[in-house]
Amino acid sequence: MELEELQSIWKHNDPGFQLKDENEIALMLKGNSQSIVDKLKRSVWFELIFTFVAGLALLIYALTLPSGALKWTSVSILLLFVAYSFYYIKKLTLLRQYNPAGENIRVSLERLTNDLTSYLRFYKRSYTVLYPIYFVLGLMFGALERGPDKFINNLSQPRTIIYLLVVALVFFFCSTWVTNWYLKKLYGNHLEKLRTLLNDIHQ
Amino acid sequence: MASGEEQRFINLINEHQGLIHKICFMYEHDSDARNDLFQEIVLQLWRSFPSFRGEAKITTWMYRIALNTAISGFRKQTRLVKTEDLQEVHMNISDSWADDREEDFQKLQWAVRQLPEIERAMIMMALEEVPYDEIAETIGITQNNVRVRMNRIREKLRKLMCP
C-alpha cells in the first residue's frame, strides 16, 4: 500500500468533527492545564508553601522551648526545611524552562523523563533515608535529655534493643512501602509510559 | 471581550482546528477525553503563542505543540479503554455507510489508532502531507530514519487493513 494511496483515502473523507465556536475557544483559554509539567509545578508550589508554613510554625514553637533535646530536634528539622525549600525553588525554575514549542518530541520526552526521575528519586531518598535518620536523631535527643548514663544503661538491655529494632524496622518498611506505592500512583505509571515512548523513538 | 492578541489567536485556532481535532481523535477514545485533550492543546498553544515569530510554518508549530501535548505532556485520569475490533468497524460501516471509500477511510483510521503513539504521530503527519524533513524535525530523528520507519508503518497498516 503506497503512501499516496493512503493520503488519498485520508484526504477525501470528512471525519465529522464537531467544530468549536469562538466562544468555546475563548473559554478554554481560561481553564487550568492538566499537563504533567503543570501538575508537577502545582505539587512543588504546594510543598514549598507547606514547608514554609510548617517551618515558620516550628520556628515560633522552638523559640518558646528551653534548651534541650526537643529544641535541638526542632532546629535540625528547620535546617532540613531550609534545604528542601532551596530544592523546591530550583525545581520550579527548571520546570519553568520547559517549553514544548521550542523542543521536538524526543527532547521533550528526555527532559520530562529526567525531571520526573529526579523528582521521584528525591522523594524516595527523603522518605526512606532522611525520615529514619530523624527517627534515630529524635530518639537520641530524647535519650540524651534523660542523661547519658541512663541512656546507655537502657540501651544495653536486650529488651530495649529488640523493641527499638522492631520499631525502626516497622517504621522503615512502612515508610518505604507507602512511599513507593504513593509515588507510583502519582507519577510512576506516567514515567513508565515516557520511557516506553523514548524507547520507541530510539528504535 | 477578547484582546487583540487573544482574538488573533482564536482566529488562528478557528482556522486550523481540524488539525487539533484529528490529533485528539487519534489519541483519545471517548469524547470527554478528546475534549479535555483539545482544551489542553489549545492552552499549550496559547502559552507558546507570544514566542511564535513565524520562523516556522504555522502548522509545523501547531503539530509540534499538539503532538508533544498528546504524547508526552497530558496526564489524564486512567480510563478503561475498550479495544475496538476491526470486525466492529466493518459492522458499523455496513450499518451506516455503503460507500467503499468511506469503508477504506474507517479502516485506515482504525489501523492508525492501533499503532504505537510515536508511529501514529509520524503517519498522521505523513497522511496530512507534511514533508519528511518537517516530520523528522518534529519527532527529533533523522530524515533517513523517518523514511525507514515510514516503510515499516506502511507495512503494518497494510497488514492491519487487509489481514
Image (tube, rainbow, N blue to C red):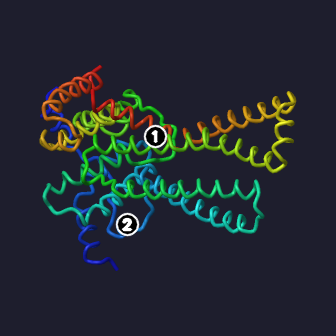
Q: Amino acid at mark 1?
A: His
Q: Is residue A42 left or right of residue A195?
A: right
Quadrant, the N terminus of chain B: bottom left
| Label 2 Cα neighbours within 10 Å, binned few <14 / some 14-19 / many ≥20 | some
Q: Which residue is mark 1?
A: A190
- Judging from the image, mark 2 belongs to the subunit labelled A
Q: How many marks?
A: 2
Which residue is label 2 attached to?
A29
Res A55 → quadrant: bottom right
- In depth, the one of B79 and A142 nearer the eye is A142
Q: Residues within 10 Å of mark 1 (few under 14, many from 20)?
A: many
Label 2 sits on what residue type? Leu
| A122 relative position to B143: left or right | right
Residue A142 point in image, percent of width and height? 79, 48
- A96 above or below A165? below
Q: Which mark is drawn over residue A176?
A: none
Judge whether A99 appears above or below A132 on screen: below
Query: Can I make out residue B36 in this image?
Result: no
